[in-house]
Amino acid sequence: MKDYQTYLLDLDGVVYRGEQVLPGAREFVAWLDATGRAYRYISNNSMASPAEVAAKLRRLGIPAPDARVVTASQAAIEYSVAHFAGQPIWVVGLPPLRQMAARAGLRVLNLARGDAPDDPAAPATVARAVLVGLHRTVTYADLREAAHAVLAGATLIGVNRDAQLPVEDGLVDPGCGAILAAIEVASRTQGQIIGKPAPAILLAALDALHADPATAVMVGDAIELDIAAGHAAGIDTILLLSGLTSPARAATADPAPTVVLRDLAEVLAQARAAAQ
């Protein structure tokens, strides 16, 4: 393995799974800090702010300043503000995503009454955009409203296209991409994706770190998301088998990762060897 100077780290399936810290995660982050390597957490999280994700990392015993976390949810809201400031949008997602959007100054039509006492509760069809994130209590009515809004001309924006979400019991739950796919099929419209596999948030992180792409690497557990994003960003990739990808699937990965390793404990061992 190359002696990388900049690491972009996925979270779910790499650093943790639910509330479980994965093997080698704490030790690897401690080594990054001790050796002065640059790194960012690049999460496709569609319901939490960078500050909330950083707080979870700290709760799990991993030091994490808020600025070290880049989330697709925040990037999607920044994109929405840039394109739809002052215009009505409809959010399919959990309350934190709707609240983040409202705090950023977006006119969210479907805020909960408790969050916005003067909410006009306008119909989704007047929306100029539909923003889709993970929604664990999504209903048929949610899908119908979103599809109708897109059919009426609203721009469809997906925080990410994660079909699956790793959970602590070793299984996977439907992710944001599963909900987005239902709306895409119903509206016959392809959504604009902000998170991985789109390379934009990786490129922004590399630019903020003034990183040399030749010595930067994306570490993730999903071929179609993390590895594809790293490939699109023009950097090396490390595929871990601690999350969504099985050894058999890794053997046929397309795009092929630069390196396939078991977990961050194995990454740490190889990184130390490469640095000598």
Image: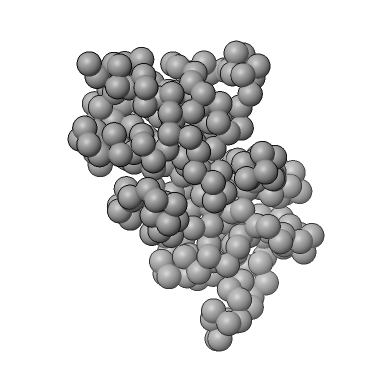
> How far across and how far down the image is residue 241, in percent?
56, 26
Q: Check the image and name the residue furthest to the bottom.
A: 117
Identify which residue, 126 or 78, lies in the foreground. 78
Q: Is any atom of residue 152 visible in this view?
A: no
Report which quarter residue 105 is drawn in.
bottom left
> How far across and how far down the image is residue 48, in percent?
49, 58
Report which quarter residue 138 is drawn in.
bottom right
Identify which residue, 30 or 216, lies in the foreground. 30
Q: Check the image and name the residue furthest to the right.
A: 140
Q: Is residue 93 left or right of residue 25?
A: right
Report which quarter residue 85 is drawn in.
bottom left
Question: Residue, x 61% and y 53% (percent of image)?
Answer: 134
Question: Residue, x 53% and y 65% (percent of image)?
Answer: 96
The number of discs equals: 0
Q: Is any atom of residue 90 visible in this view?
A: yes
> How far across and how far down the image is residue 76, in percent?
47, 52
